[in-house]
Amino acid sequence: MNDTTDSSEAGQGAHKPPVCPQDRPKIDVEQLLAGKREVCLCYRDEEYRLRITRNSKLILTK
């Protein structure tokens, strides 16, 4: 077998955060949450929950 790995990606550990294109609006999640850890979002008659975890990760659930 000949397994090769791109050394530029292998073992970096840290990854670059995604960059938003200039033409898309940015929404500050802290403003959206208004000091809370969770909000409900409505989209097409469906409710979604956006929350911040103890590890400061964002989770969106239906």
Image (spheres, helix red, strand yellow):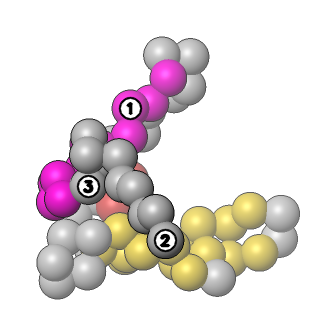
Side (left or right) of 42 relative to 34 = right
Q: Quadrant of the C terminus?
A: bottom right
Q: Say the numbered circle drawn on residue 42.
A: none
Residue pictured at 16% horizontal, 78% vertical: 55
> How many dots with numbers?
3
How busy is the neighbourhood of tag 3: few (under 14 within 10 Å), some, or many (20 plus)?
A: few
Q: Say the numbered circle drawn on residue 1.
A: 2
Q: Nearer the viewer, residue 35 or 55?
A: 55
Question: Closer to the N terminus: mark 1 or mark 2?
Answer: 2
Q: Position of residue 54 (x, y in %)?
A: 17, 83
* Image quadrant assignment for residue 56: bottom left
Q: Position of residue 28 (x, y in %)?
A: 33, 42
Q: Position of residue 41 (x, y in %)?
A: 59, 66
Residue pictured at 27% horizontal, 70% vertical: 57
Mark 2 falls on what kind of element?
A: loop
Side (left or right) of 6 relative to 48 = left
Q: Residue furthest top?
A: 22
Question: Closer to the N terminus: mark 3 or mark 2?
Answer: 2
Between the residue at mark 3 and the residue at mark 2, the CA separation in whole angstroms equals: 19 Å
Q: Are marks 3 and 2 in contact (CB under 8 Å)?
A: no
How busy is the neighbourhood of tag 2: few (under 14 within 10 Å), some, or many (20 plus)?
A: few
Which kind of residue does numbered mark 2 sit on?
A: Met
Q: Position of residue 38 (x, y in %)?
A: 37, 76
Magenta extent: 11-21
Mark 1 falls on what kind of element?
A: loop
Residue 6 visible, this orientation: yes
Q: Say the numbered circle drawn on residue 19.
A: 1
Residue under label 3, please give it: 10
Q: Residue furthest front?
A: 1
Residue pictured at 83% horizontal, 63% vertical: 44
